[in-house]
Image (tube, helix red, strand yellow):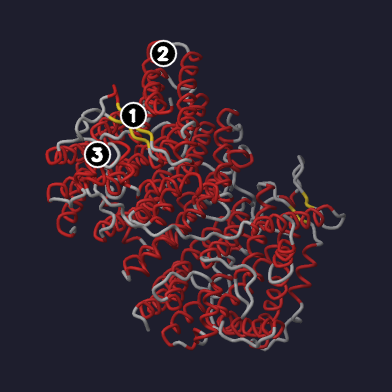
């Protein structure tokens, strides 16, 4: 019975997409009901796989129409769900379920919602299918559905400025990426005469030919475009910024994770190239550049969602760097960070969406002081900001810490100074992330409330619930990192390294042995975290300190004085004796000392981010050429 | 569940070497600093206990929450800062003694110190004052400035001590020094030590790196709207940072000394902290004027980082 769950979940989402269009284009209740029912069922079906796959270590395989392999050749489309697939599938279902709930409130004011939910369900179904399929061409089909649904959703609010432009950029760059993937798949099919990933892996285990190296370069580039690593990141910034926020959350939570998944699946399972230091270095450098460029660009943005978009790019850099190391520790850190990124970036996008919903703008120079009007959003945002900046005890700290350890372990073991530079970059990027969120906090939530936002109200409960769920998960992930590691990360990273199991389950016992496949030997995961007992103690201190403040706050002499209705001048802000006036310091005004020193760098970056699609396409093609060349020249 | 170890942990966090010890040492160092700088400027200066008097006096004063401020964040920020600073000392070996030891506590220390700064930034930001807005902008840039050399120093030490294996543990660093002699006496680490000496005043916010609080131009920046107990907490946090940073320097570069007895170890530790304070906080304060923020950034990313990088490369070459 259980082997039917994955394919049912995918089919259900696609079916619901058409049902929404047929029955729900007029009436909101039917539309929402179909969407909610389908996404909840998919969520339940995928979560029901956890005991078997994550705990008992089984691999679920499913041949469509029971077209099982004939004399060792896969002829049908197969689904294969190992712990790695399920890990990403869990991210996907959680993201679109929460985003769906949020949409019910957030999208209420828009028109043509039938189309919106159709596309939303198509996107959800395609990404879910992508992470669970065992067939490389089926994967490509899902990538295509994903790309076109994303393009349409990017341009969904096509009456707003820049939406169509962003959709167009996404369309062009996305198609270029898909074509690379397709070309790579075609080369592989020409060589191996099969499209099943398990069988491909077995056939390629004899050593990569020049042909398959070319295919590998093209496929890495193709999935690089889907995960928006620099220099393929250019459409992402526009797309995340203009898409409805619920869709931005899907983009950063699962669409770019699909690219990361594809990359892991290809380099670890199909090509099994991660024991080669050249591939490791290639991906590590791309990862480091991605995180650095992403965060420096984010620092200068003055549009809330665009800033978050650049942070998405930057955080994916961490993930790529970590998985590039080819060690179990790196994989653990990378997957953990991917999970955490889904949570905290989803939360931040939802907070940005709440601000947009309440005020109608996300321009950092035109906001300020919202914390008094939107206290719940502010708290959720602060949790997300602390998590993405990697402050303990939030989840971002836990995963970044593992990433640092993994990178520096690689540095000392290989003696390669490059990894030291990457470690330093990763640590500095973390501070810069913090800086740009300080900027957002100051520009949007603190400071002075503007005249036009005096009447702003907190967003409805249906939008707050997903935010609180994600905020709670952000804290739990940091405190109970051990649980996350045992039940999710350890099985998933073991699955990525256990190729023989993956092949045998799909193609029959003994197939891998016959083909001479051996697993990549990775060191067992050894990482340390601080003692959980610390937390008990820390809470003790929190209590003590809070009591201290309350005691001192409540006694008769040293009272905490809160302003009352009739404004007493002692509660006014200090203005050196001048008359009080509007004086918000935020947005573009901040971090002058930093930007001044980096103006040369920003001039170069400005030139590269010209906004012209031809330039971006050139960048994409050049980077692909470099990747393919590296695969040719440096691989054994 | 509730074992002796738990009780010990409470003792570690609350009394020694956690909250109380850090606070007392910090306030003592602040007092020494004020006294000595006064003498350098031909003044008599306040008594060494003055920072403690100030703290208790502030705790009894009214705390005014300004009309523009977000009350919870405004009052919560100093407490959060205090909590994170109170636990840092547990990871720093006091000569032979470490309360908590992990495999990668260097990074924990790095991030916990950051929280101290973030608390100041978020608190100042929530007050809604434009002066605070400028202050937090500068504080954040200062933080970005010293983080690079700080990270490089830590990595250099880790490489020097660890060799071909990963060592991010403070305890391992202290033990290595007990066997091989303090790191300050290994010539390849001297540039890193110098860089660290320049990071300390920036981290604590002392002249010439006090651009964020610059009381003569932006009236203490983030602290402008603070009063009473909340201000007292922030003053205490600054003092604790002083103890933590000098303590970190001591155990990174002078961690090789052992007297064999707990109390004399602690006394030695505090004395070295005091000397470090006098060298890198008091003396530099007395002889320099405040930098501009863009110069500060440049100074740290070129000169100080260069020193730290030199050590890192030397350590990498096995020297």
Question: Going 68% across and 47% down the picture, which residue do you hit?
Answer: B72
Residue A331 vertical position relative to residue A162 in the rendered view, above or below: below
> Mark 1 belongs to which subunit?
A
Q: Secondary structure at mark 1?
A: strand
Residue B131 visible in image:
no
In the rendering, at what x and y percent does residue B44 appear? 73, 86
Say which residue label 2 marks. A25
Residue A479 vertical position relative to residue A137 in the rendered view, above or below: below
In the rendering, at what x and y percent does residue A625 appear? 16, 50
What's the distance in space between the residues labelled 2 and 3, CA to CA?
31 Å
Question: Going 27% across and 40% down the picture, which residue do you hit?
Answer: A198
Residue B90 vertical position relative to residue A473 in the rendered view, above or below: below
What mark, if any, has residue A173 been given in the picture?
Answer: 3
Tag nearer the camera, 3 or 1: 1
Tag nearer the camera, 2 or 1: 1
> Mark 2 belongs to which subunit?
A
Task: Please tell me if label 3 and label 1 are on a single chain.
Answer: yes
Q: Secondary structure at mark 2?
A: loop
Q: Secondary structure at mark 3?
A: helix
Residue A90 vertical position relative to residue A494 in the rendered view, above or below: above
| Neighbourhood count class around disc 2 (C-alpha, 10 Å): few under 14, some 14–19, many 20 upward | some
Q: Nearer the viewer, residue A5 or A381?
A: A5
Residue A266 visible in image:
yes
Q: Earlier in the sequence, mark 3 or mark 1?
A: 1
Q: Earlier in the sequence, mark 2 or mark 3?
A: 2
Question: Going 52% across and 76% down the picture, which residue do you hit?
Answer: B173
> Mark 3 belongs to which subunit?
A
Say which residue label 1 marks. A62
């Amino acid at each position: 019975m259980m082997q039917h769950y994955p394919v049912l979940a995918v089919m259900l989402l696609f079916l619901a997409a058409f049902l929404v269009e047929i029955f729900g284009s007029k009436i909101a209740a039917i539309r929402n009901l179909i969407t909610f029912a389908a996404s909840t069922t998919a969520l339940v079906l995928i979560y029901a796989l956890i005991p078997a796959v994550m705990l008992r270590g089984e691999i679920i395989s499913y041949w469509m129409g029971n077209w099982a392999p004939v004399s060792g050749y896969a002829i049908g489309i197969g689904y294969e769900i190992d712990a790695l697939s399920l890990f990403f599938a869990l991210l996907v279902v959680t993201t679109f379920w929460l985003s769906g709930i949020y949409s019910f409130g957030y999208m209420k004011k828009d028109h043509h919602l039938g189309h919106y939910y159709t596309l939303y369900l198509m996107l959800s179904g395609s990404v879910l299918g992508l992470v669970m399929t065992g067939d490389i061409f089926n994967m490509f089909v899902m990538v295509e559905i994903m790309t076109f649904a994303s393009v349409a959703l990017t341009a969904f609010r096509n009456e707003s400025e820049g939406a169509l432009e962003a959709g167009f950029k996404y369309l062009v760059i996305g198609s270029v990426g898909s074509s690379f993937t397709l070309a790579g798949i075609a080369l592989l099919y020409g060589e191996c005469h099969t499209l099943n990933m398990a069988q491909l892996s077995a056939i390629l285990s004899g050593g990569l030919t020049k042909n398959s190296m070319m295919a590998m370069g093209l496929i890495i580039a193709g999935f690089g475009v889907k995960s928006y690593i620099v220099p393929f990141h250019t459409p992402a910034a526009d797309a995340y910024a203009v898409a409805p926020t619920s869709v931005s959350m899907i983009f950063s939570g699962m669409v770019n994770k699909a690219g990361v998944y594809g990359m892991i699946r290809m380099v670890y399972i199909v090509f099994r190239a991660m024991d080669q230091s050249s591939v490791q270095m290639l991906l590590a450098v791309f990862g480091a550049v991605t995180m650095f460029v992403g965060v420096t660009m984010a620092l200068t943005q003055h549009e809330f969602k665009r800033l978050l978009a650049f942070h998405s790019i930057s955080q994916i850099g961490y993930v790529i760097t970590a998985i590039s190391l080819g060690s179990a520790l790196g994989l653990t850190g990378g997957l953990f960070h991917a999970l955490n990124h889904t949570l905290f970036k989803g939360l931040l996008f939802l907070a940005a969406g709440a601000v947009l919903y309440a005020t109608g703008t996300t321009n950092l120079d035109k906001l300020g002081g919202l914390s008094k009007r939107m206290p719940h959003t502010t708290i959720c945002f602060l949790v997300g900001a602390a998590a993405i900046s990697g402050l303990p005890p939030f989840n971002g700290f836990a995963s970044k810490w593992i990433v640092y350890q993994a990178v520096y372990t690689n540095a000392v073991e290989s003696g390669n100074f490059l990894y030291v530079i990457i470690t330093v970059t990763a640590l500095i990027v973390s501070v810069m992330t913090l800086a740009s969120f300080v900027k957002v906090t100051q520009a949007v939530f603190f400071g002075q409330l503007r005249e036009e936002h005096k009447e702003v109200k907190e967003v409805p409960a249906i939008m707050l619930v997903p935010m609180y769920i994600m905020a709670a998960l952000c804290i739990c992930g940091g405190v109970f990192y051990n649980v996350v590691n045992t039940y999710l990360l350890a099985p998933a990273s073991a699955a990525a390294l256990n190729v023989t199991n993956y092949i045998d389950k799909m193609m029959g016992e003994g197939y891998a042995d016959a083909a001479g496949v051996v697993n990549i030997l990775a060191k067992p995961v050894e990482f340390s975290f601080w003692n959980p007992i610390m937390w008990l103690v820390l809470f003790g201190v929190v209590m003590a300190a809070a009591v201290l403040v309350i005691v001192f706050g409540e006694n008769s002499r040293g009272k905490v004085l809160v302003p009352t209705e009739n404004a007493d001048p002692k509660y006014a802000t200090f203005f050196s004796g001048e008359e009080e006036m509007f004086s918000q310091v935020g947005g573009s005004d901040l971090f002058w000392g930093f930007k001044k020193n980096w103006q040369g760098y920003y001039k170069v970056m400005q030139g590269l981010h010209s906004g012209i699609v031809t330039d971006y396409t050139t960048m994409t093609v050049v980077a692909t050429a470099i990747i393919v060349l590296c695969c040719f020249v440096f691989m054994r | 569940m509730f074992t002796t170890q738990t009780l010990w942990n409470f003792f570690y966090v609350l009394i020694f070497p956690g909250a109380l010890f850090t606070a007392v040492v910090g306030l003592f160092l602040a007092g020494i600093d004020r006294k000595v700088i006064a003498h350098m400027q031909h003044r008599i200066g306040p008594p060494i206990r003055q920072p403690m008097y100030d703290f208790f006096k502030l705790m009894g004063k009214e705390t005014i929450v300004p009309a523009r401020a977000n009350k919870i964040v405004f009052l919560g920020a100093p407490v959060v800062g205090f909590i994170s600073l109170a636990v840092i000392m547990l990871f720093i070996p006091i000569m032979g003694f470490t309360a908590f030891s992990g495999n990668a506590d260097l990074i924990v220390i790095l991030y916990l110190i950051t929280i101290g700064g973030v608390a100041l930034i978020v608190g100042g930001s929530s007050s809604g004052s434009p002066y605070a807005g400028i202050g937090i902008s500068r504080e954040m840039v200062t933080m970005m400035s010293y983080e690079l050399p700080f990270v490089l120093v830590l990595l250099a030490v880790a490489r020097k001590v660890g060799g071909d294996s990963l060592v991010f543990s403070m305890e391992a660093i202290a033990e290595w020094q007990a066997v091989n002699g303090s790191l300050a006496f290994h010539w390849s680490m001297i540039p890193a030590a110098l860089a660290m000496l320049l990071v300390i005043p920036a981290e604590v916010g002392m002249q010439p790196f006090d651009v964020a609080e610059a009381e003569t131009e932006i009236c203490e920046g983030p602290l402008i709207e603070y009063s009473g107990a909340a201000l007292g907490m922030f003053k205490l946090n600054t003092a604790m940072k002083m103890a933590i940073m000098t303590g970190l320097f001591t155990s990174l570069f002078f961690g090789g000394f052992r007297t064999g007895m707990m109390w004399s170890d602690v006394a030695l530790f505090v004395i070295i902290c005091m000397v470090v304070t006098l060298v890198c906080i008091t003396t530099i304060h007395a002889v320099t004027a405040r930098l501009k923020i863009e110069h500060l950034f440049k100074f740290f990313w070129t000169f100080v980082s260069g020193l730290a990088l030199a050590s890192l490369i030397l350590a990498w070459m096995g020297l």
